[in-house]
Image (tube, grey):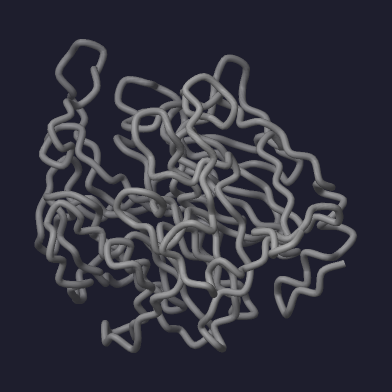
Amino acid sequence: MLKIERGIARLLTATAIAALGVATASFAQPPAGGAPGGPGARPAYDYNKSDRTAEDKALQNPFASNNGWYEMPAGRYIGGISGIEIDKKDGKSLWIFERCGGRDMCVGNHVDPIIHFAPDGKIIKMFGKDEVAYPHGLYVDPDNNVWITDLQSNMDPAARRGRPIPSQDGIAPTKKLGATVTKYSPDGKILLTIGTPGVYGNDATHLSQPSDVITDKQGNIYVADSHDSEPSNDRVVKYDKTGKFIKQWEACKPTDKSQIDCAHALAWDSKGQLYVGNRSNDSVDVYTQDGVLVKSITNWGKPSGIFIDDKDNMYVSDSQSGTGNNMKFVKGVRIGALADGKPKWSAPDPLGNMALWSGGSTLSPEGVTADKDGIMYTSHVTPGGITKWTISKTMKPFPYAPGQ
């Protein structure tokens, strides 16, 4: 049996292994072409023929994956998912924020995008119908309130790179949505909204493409107000617990305004330092709660999602590396202790397509979290899905060592 240190060792418990075994199921929604072995399949990606460092190639994969552990209502497929979080009260059930069965806006779909799953994959509750334009970030606070970031406006197409806003039932929208952060009670009651719905901006009362949100022990609210195209504010914004603006700071100084994306994900370590996924620059940037940059960590891929457990093990999901814009890493999750700042384990793209997404190919995993027993979950955008990861007792480490 593999020896995994500290928090990762919890994956070796009988509970964790019993939750999955080694079975691998298919995604709830079939991938749209380009899937391994399917119509339009691409040649297998050679993990060892790239610009990856020797250290990254040597990362071991002790995991087995299950892509079909959950159930959706009859006639409904799961959509693209960025936001994924473990319930703070029970430490086992799972919250997701999905794109209403598609991979883009919820406009006109009239289904609940916020879903709470029991550990056995059955739905506990759903809410948020017709209250969200473009699902993205998700955070569950210590009181089990559910925070979401609604990335794009349903009124203003400026952030859509020429794509139109989807049909809104053939009529002009009467309710402005998007470019906001919303706090829900665990039962789905709206408690707080930050930003001006449907309107982009860069001042104290507006947001532009907010990617993620998190709160500190005092209840202060931090928003990653930065995504991958203009208008994007490329900033982290701090508010008090009532939503009153406190301050902001620049996440980075991008050289390419078409790929801003300097604050895509947020997480805390045990010292109260804020970890910011700087996806544009392949780094995790660490700040004080006042916005002072402490350090940048650059060997964890392109961070789309970050989770830090109570033992200060960091999980970083990378949904965009591969051929094309980044050959230094491959898509997947890297895991390691913050004490040395280096990843020690990895889990690959669960669909086996490591090339950069385009058209029907995969863009995954975007979000990552783990429960109190160390079972890891990743969320996926193209196609939408949720993968459960536990330790495998039969699979060889990945990538294979020479001679195996």
Nearer to the camera, 100 or 43: 43
Q: Is residue 122 visible?
A: no
Quarter holding the N terminus is bottom right
| Above/below status of 128 relative to 276 | above
Which residue corresponds to the image point at 39% horizontal and 51% vertical from the top-left?
A: 320
Query: Relative to the observer, which residue lies in front, 89 or 85?
Result: 85
Q: Residue furthest top?
A: 170
Q: Quadrant of residue 152?
A: top left
The answer, for residue 168, to whether it is visible in the render is yes
Horizontal placement of 302 versus 349: left or right? left
Examine the rendered structure and indicate whether residue 221 appears above or below residue 297.
above
Measuring from the top left, give residue 362's x and y in whole percent: 46, 38
Callout count: 0
State the image coordinates of residue 167 (x, y, percent, origin top left).
23, 17
Residue 183 x, y percent position in the rendering: 39, 53
The residue under the point 62% across, 49% down is 94
Residue plotted at (43% across, 42% down):
363
